[in-house]
Image (tube, coloured by chain):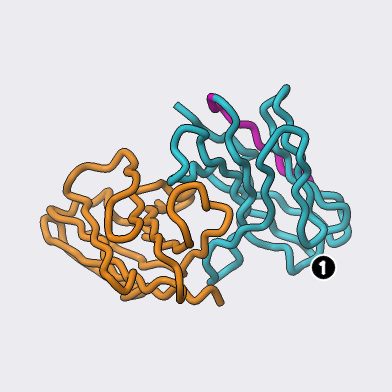
Amino acid sequence: ETGVTQSPTHLIKTRGQQVTLRCSSQSGHNTVSWYQQALGQGPQFIFQYYREEENGRGNFPPRFSGLQFPNYSSELNVNALELDDSALYLCASSLGGGGTNEKLFFGSGTQLSVL
Amino acid sequence: GDSVTQMEGPVTLSEEAFLTINCTYTATGYPSLFWYVQYPGEGLQLLLKATKADDKGSNKGFEATYRKETTSFHLEKGSVQVSDSAVYFCALTPYSSASKIIFGSGTRLSIRP
């Protein structure tokens, strides 16, 4: 048990809709990273937030956006959903921003299906 | 760009067999290297890491050595157990972008009793 919780665990949406996924970090962690894991693939980095500011971004379009709140919980928002957005979305928390990836703790993920 | 290539699975072994999962990487500079494990129904967990050339990471009987000359980080275990059945991911953090991890595609390992 890592202490990182994600909600919901499963979600079904239709193409063109918008979705918000939520993550509660491990206590005391000020950094959150989001990853997309397609079926049978490794996770791909979406972005990282450190103390409420974006601290790095992967090759994802602007319709993927995020927020980190003062209590360090986080949201991932995806607009104009496409079929290829169907994946497991993973949240990971750590302490101290970039350079601390060896101390990442992952949640169990939100499984998003886009129909 | 930086990338990780790992042995395709699935890999099926008998209990107590020797395990090797191959991993090679492409990166500039000196990335940090990791092996992560995903047990059924659980989140990703860090298994072991190495941050510089010739470092050996080890945990739970698993080992991997950071080989700069061959750009490899192969995972080994001398005697696998049924409980080692999981998906294993080789990964790196680029020297130039410490906020992200680049993962390989994963290798599913199944151990027969």
In the rendered image of this protein, which colour is used for chain B? cyan
Q: Chain of mark 1?
A: B
In the rendered image, residue A82, in percent from the top left (x then y), is placed at 19, 50
Q: Can residue B94 be spotted in the picture?
A: yes
- Identity of the residue drawn at 22% across and 51% down: A64
Give the structural element (helix, strand or loop) at label 1: loop
In the rendered image, residue B82, in percent from the top left (x then y), is placed at 77, 67
> Residue B83, located in which quarter of the rendered image?
bottom right
Front-most of residues A45 and B9: A45
- Identity of the residue drawn at 76% across and 44% down: B64
Residue type at tag 1 = Pro
Residue at numbered disc 1: B113
> Residue B62, located in which quarter of the rendered image?
bottom right
In the rendered image, residue A56, in percent from the top left (x then y), is placed at 34, 44
Task: Name the side, left or right, on which A91 lies relative to A68.
Answer: right
Q: Residue B23: within the magenta?
A: yes
**Quarter occupied by the C terminus of chain A:** bottom left
- Identity of the residue drawn at 70% across and 59% down: B110
Q: Residue A99: within the magenta?
A: no
Highlighted magenta segment, given as a residue range: B20-28
Among the chains pictured, the one given orange colouring is A
> Residue B44, located in which quarter of the rendered image?
bottom right
- Identity of the residue drawn at 61% across and 54% down: B36
